[in-house]
Amino acid sequence: MAASSAPPPPPRRLLALAMALAASAVSAASAARVPASVTPISRTLYHSSDSLLSDIKALVARHPDKLSMDTITASNKGYSTDLFIVTFNHAKESTSNSSKIHVLLSFGQHGRELITSEVALNLLYILTEKRKIAGVDLSSFEKILENLVIKVVPMENLNGRKRVEEGELCDRRNGRGVDLNRNWSVDWGKKEKDYDPYEENPGTAPFSEPEAQIMRELSKSFKPHMWVNVHSGMEALFMPYDHKNTTPNGASAHLMRTVLENLNHRHFQDSCLVGSGGGAVGYLAHGTTTDYMYDIVKVPMPFTFEIYGDEKASTSDCFKMFNPVDKTTFDRVINKWCMAFLILFEEGLRNLHEAQLVSQGAVDNWVPMGGDIVEISAARKSSPDKRKLEGLDLGMQELRTYFRLFMLSTVLLMFMFCSRISKNRNRDTGNIFDS
């Protein structure tokens, strides 16, 4: 009896269809958690976190003369995260770094605000490859860029972003449920009457989260002249303070307001809300990054930009509320805010030079030091070796403060003790002469 013949192989079209169905099943697993009435992530407009970082790494590899990339890993009590920091330095050889303006930009601090990281990616393209934005020639900005060193954090909250990609579209927190923009030390932990424990969880202590720890060390070592924390939810240009309904006093406040009002007038036709975050947005926020940058790091120009918001969207439709969902609006937001950053660089450079606030010091070789980072390692994109960096123990800065207070109180006690002895001696001398 002849052996039965094997079944014919399935046609290529069937194989392709089976592979497509398997791929769609993966994305459907996350989409299944999204109600039908809620707008899902538009995969045709938005990168996944992995693909966005892959594009940035490829861009850095194509432009080693202008870009470099650091990967920082930090962990605390079993929770770890990676932070990717891209440095743009347009004219490394021709211009001394000590005379350049330092700009630090952070995107994606809240996981649900995907549009901010798309702006980061496109801004890096513009700084290196694109010559035009919506028909505008960018050659006039070349001279400005020669005077800047720009550090871009394209996705500060990577773990939180992955939670959003898995279907938690309203989640703004990090991978263990902490709002990174409430985890900084200025006025930390204070709760307003409208406090939302889910949205605004400040963590167990200031800088309890590795993401905030890395950003703090970066800000202290890089010493930026300009800081921008990029968010979405509305269109606004904010300066300190977030935790109170006021702006700082004096020349620094005037400098910040001048830059923002010029940017608003030149680029937005005065359509953006301008002022303090706490005074203009309608609620007070405690433990924010921008307030720390101003009060502690002493950044001359710390800002928070809100780049998009759909006021008509339902509060439960978070992706639509915080991100454009059609290509026309998406492209408009990208182009408008990338150009806004170029104008900000121009305004900031001019005003900082006029105010004579440009500090000295090299900026290429920053190394995280100090603080309460339990475990931290860094890898330079252009270097094959990885370095282990160890931070100081938790609260070292506070211990120094307590030590100074202890020394001061000791001196005061010694002074009081010596004064008492002197008075007793004088009293005894008087008794001798009276007897």
Image (cartoon, rainbow, N blue to C red):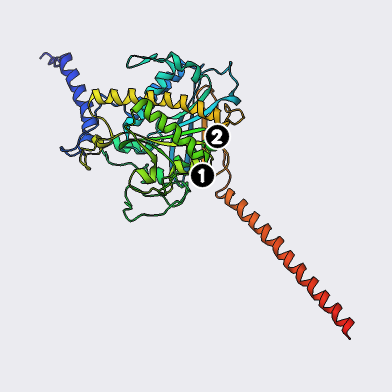
User: Percent x, y for residue 191?
Assistant: 38, 54
SS class, disc 2: loop
User: Percent x, y for residue 104?
Assistant: 48, 31
Q: Which of 299/48 is in front?
A: 299
Q: Is residue 5 above or below residue 250?
A: above
The residue furthest bottom is 435
Circle number at residue 295? 1
For the C terminus, the image quarter is: bottom right
Q: Is residue 90 above or below residue 359?
A: above
The crowding category of the residue bearing disc 1, from other C-alpha atoms within 10 Å (few below 14, some 14 to 19, many at least 20), is: some
The crowding category of the residue bearing disc 2, from other C-alpha atoms within 10 Å (few below 14, some 14 to 19, many at least 20), is: many
Residue 188 seen in the figure: yes
**Residue type at tag 2:** Lys
Circle number at residue 159? none
User: Percent x, y for residue 90?
Assistant: 51, 18
Q: Are marks 2 and 1 in contact (CB under 8 Å)?
A: no
SS class, disc 1: helix
The residue drawn where x is 17% and y is 39% is 35
Left/right of residue 400 with respect to residue 37 in the rendered view: right
The residue drawn where x is 20% and y is 34% is 39
Viewer-nearest of labels 2 and 1? Answer: 1
Give the quadrant of residue 44.
top left
Left/right of residue 364 with respect to residue 183 in the rendered view: right
Q: Earlier in the sequence, mark 2 or mark 1?
A: 2
For the N terminus, the image quarter is: top left
Circle number at residue 223? 2
**Residue type at tag 1:** Asp
